[in-house]
Amino acid sequence: MLIFENVCFSYPGGSPVLEEVTFAVRNAEKVGLIGANGAGKSTLLKCVPGLLTASGKITVSGIEVCREKLADVRRKVGYVLQDPDNQMFMPKVIDDMIFGPVNYGLSREEAEAQADKVLEDLGISRLRDRYNHRISGGEKRMAAIATVLAMEPDVMLMDEPSSSLDPKNRRALINTIKKLDKTMLIASHDLDMILDTCSRVVLLDGGKVIADGECGDILHDRELLEAHCLELPLSLL
Amino acid sequence: MDNAERALLDLRAMDELASMDSPYHRLSPLSKLVMTIVYILITTSFHKYDLTGLLFMVIFPLLGYQFAMIPVSTCFSKLRGVLPLVAAVGLLNPLFDRVPVFRIGRITVTSGMVSMITLMLKGVFCLMASFLLMATTQIDDLCRALRRIHCPRVITSLILLTFRYTSVLLDEVSDMTQAYSLRAPGQKGIHISAWGTFLGQLLLRTMDRADALYEAMMLRGFSGEFHYAAGKRSSRYSWAVTLAVCIAAVTARYINIPAFLTSLFI
């Protein structure tokens, strides 16, 4: 479970990016975090594993995010970064996949077995021994998700997972997200993907929660979306 | 393809070389590191006039490349930028040290010439050995090996992050150069008036990317230790090879093997 209580954040000398953000993501629930550019989606995600220090309270699987407990929190959180090139820093996909589990105490053999299982579940075993710089953008995105899943996180955060994917890879990603039985918070502008994968949506604007409710209710509300620089998902037009 | 892109490919090629499988690659990183350090120390300790004794030291890198299944030419082509600098060491020796040693036909070979060649060979051999280590050991394994010999964590982290940062830097240089050249057709390189902005932007962009990379590492439990490289344990085979190389190198240092072999026949 992921809980945000009165979370506020501003960059030094800047105006507030997040203001009194309060909502919770229940176990195994998939929540879409939507909003225009600069609404504070990525900032909010970064506060969860403590990459940014916000005021207020964030709790991940019962552990409060604070300096002393960062290692425990990061063990529970899997963060799929916006740019897979930043996520994949080892030479091969398999090296990247075992990086996290081995850092958290698994032996290399155990980590490889875990990685193999994830690759098989995602149907991308062919990428196992490929070099990161030799795989396509779509494959890299799937591999980035695999590196996070290999850590068996309780909560997954995804920042614009479908950006720069072609339709086929985007569909594969949507199917993968739907298959995963994890607590997820997905920040995206791709409202069609959110409609396909999430049961609930939180709409942010100017760092504030504007709406929080059923995916169908919010994503069908043309007036609400347009008032906050968004538009209806293409499939609903 | 611009220079930055070419350099980036070169850097990635090193990763690919290090991921190959060969008898030399299978040696443990720590034993390869120890072997290389001992080799470099002994090679550099040869007397400046001991050219014939030094020649024996070429055997280690040559055999190493054979067992690693990497052509020696790869080393020379990748290090083409550095080799002239190494070779330039001792270039002035013949001017200052003019004591005649022997003659080849009409040419008098001076001790300055001998010491120049010795210094050049020392540099080239050491580079060959270092490249062999880099081409057969992944950077993370190398850093792990350095930690095992109690190299401070800050240094190993620095080495690792510099390696990662270099690829990020080259990536950004390549992107920015392409973006520039697309909007400055017919211009060769980047105009001097744009250098300041270009470098400033490059610094900011690479800092952002490097930050993101470091965050990605921290999010997956990185704390400066190289646990994920720990699986490659030292084997008896690795240490036997290391011991053999060290004994051979020490022997070559104290016994002039080429001269000894020659004396057997002449």
Image (spheres, rainbow, N blue to C red):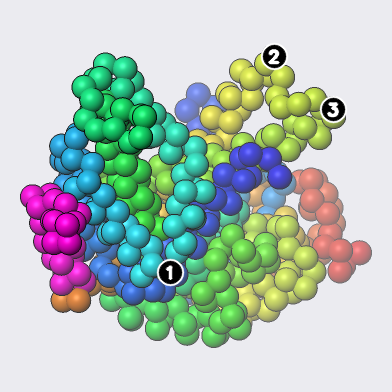
- From the viewer's perspective, is B208 left or right of A211? left
Q: Residue furthest left?
A: B254
- From the viewer's perspective, is A222 left or right of B260? right
Which of the 4 image quadrants contains residue B118?
A: top left
Q: Residues within 10 Å of mark 1 (few under 14, many from 20)?
A: some
As helix, strand or loop, the secondary structure at mark 2 comes to helix
Q: Is residue A152 magenta?
A: no
Pointer 2 indicates a residue of which chain? Answer: B
Does A169 appear above or below B200? below
Q: What secondary structure predominates along the stretch shown in magenta? A: helix
Near-viewer residue (A219 or B140): B140
Mark 2 vs mark 3, foreground winner is 3
- From the viewer's perspective, is B254 left or right of A59? left
Tags 2 and 1 touching, CB below 8 Å: no
Tell me the kind of residue under disc 1. Answer: Met
Q: Residue furthest right?
A: A237
Residue at x-position 41% and y-position 31% = B85
Same chain under badges 3 and 1? The reply is yes
Tell me the kind of residue under disc 3. Answer: Gly
Residue pointed to by mark 3: B186
- How far apart are the alpha carbons under marks 3 and 1? 44 Å
Q: Which mark is residue B193?
A: 2
As helix, strand or loop, the secondary structure at mark 3 comes to loop
Residue B134 x %, y %: 37, 54
Residue at x-position 19% and y-position 48% = B53
Regarding residue B27, the answer to whether it shows in the image is yes
Q: Which mark is residue B69?
A: 1
- From the viewer's perspective, is B38 left or right of A109? left
Which circle's residue, 2 or 3, is located before the other in the chain?
Answer: 3
